[in-house]
C-alpha cells in the first residue's frame, strides 16, 4: 500500500477550500464581515488568528468542515 501526503498544498488545494468555507462561516453563521489579518505562521493555531476566530468559533468550524 502506498500513501501520499500533500504537505505543501500543491495537489489538493486544501487552503483554497478552507477559505471558501471560512468566508461562508464568517458571513452566514457569525454574521460578521469577512476579513483576514496578518499572521505568525510559526504559531500552530495561525488559521484561527488569520480569520479572527475565538477558541469556540474555531472548534465549531472544524466540526462542520471535518
Image (cartoon, helix red, strand yellow):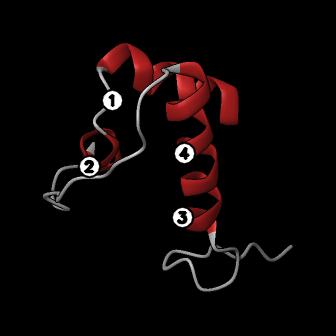
Identify residue for label 1: 53
Q: Mark 2 = which residue? A: 46
Q: CA distance from mark 2 to mark 3?
A: 13 Å
Residue on which disc 3 sits: 15
Measure the C-alpha gap from mark 1 to mark 3. Answer: 17 Å
| Front position among marks 1 and 2 | 1
Residue at the image position 68 percent from the left and 26 percent from the top: 64
The residue shown at (48%, 20%) is 30
**Residue at (55, 28) in percent of width and height:** 61
Which of the two marks, 1 or 3, is nearer to us in this view?
1
In the visual, does 1 lie left or right of 4?
A: right
Nearer-N-terminus badge (2/4): 4
- Asked if the residues shown at circle 1 and circle 4 are in contact, with their CB atoms under 8 angstroms apart, the answer is no
Real-space Cα separation, disc 1 to disc 2, in angstroms: 10 Å
Sequence-wise, the earlier of marks 1 and 3 is 3
The answer to whether the residue labelled 2 contacts the one labelled 4, judged by CB atoms less than 8 Å apart, is no
As drawn, 24 above or below 7: above
Residue 37: x and y in percent read: 21, 53
Q: Which structural element holds mark 3? A: helix
Residue at the right extreme, as displayed: 1
Mark 4 — residue? 23
Front position in the image: 9 or 22: 22
Residue neighbourhood size for the residue with mark 1, other residues' Cα within 10 Å, grouped as few (<14), some (14–19), many (≥20): some
How many discs appear?
4
Residue 17 is situated, as x and y percent measured from the top left of the image, at: 65, 59
Mark 2 → mark 4, Cα distance in angstroms: 16 Å
Specify the quadrant of the image occupied by residue 11: bottom right
| Residue 11 visible here | yes
Q: Earlier in the sequence, mark 3 or mark 4?
A: 3
Q: Position of residue 38 (x, y in %)?
A: 17, 59
Amino acid at each position: 500500500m502506498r500513501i501520499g501526503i500533500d504537505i505543501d498544498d500543491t495537489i489538493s488545494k486544501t487552503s483554497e477550500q478552507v477559505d471558501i468555507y471560512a468566508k461562508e462561516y464568517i458571513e452566514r453563521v457569525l454574521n460578521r464581515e469577512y476579513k483576514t489579518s496578518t499572521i505568525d505562521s510559526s504559531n500552530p493555531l495561525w488559521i484561527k488568528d488569520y480569520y479572527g476566530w475565538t477558541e469556540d468559533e474555531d472548534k465549531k468550524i472544524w466540526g462542520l468542515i471535518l
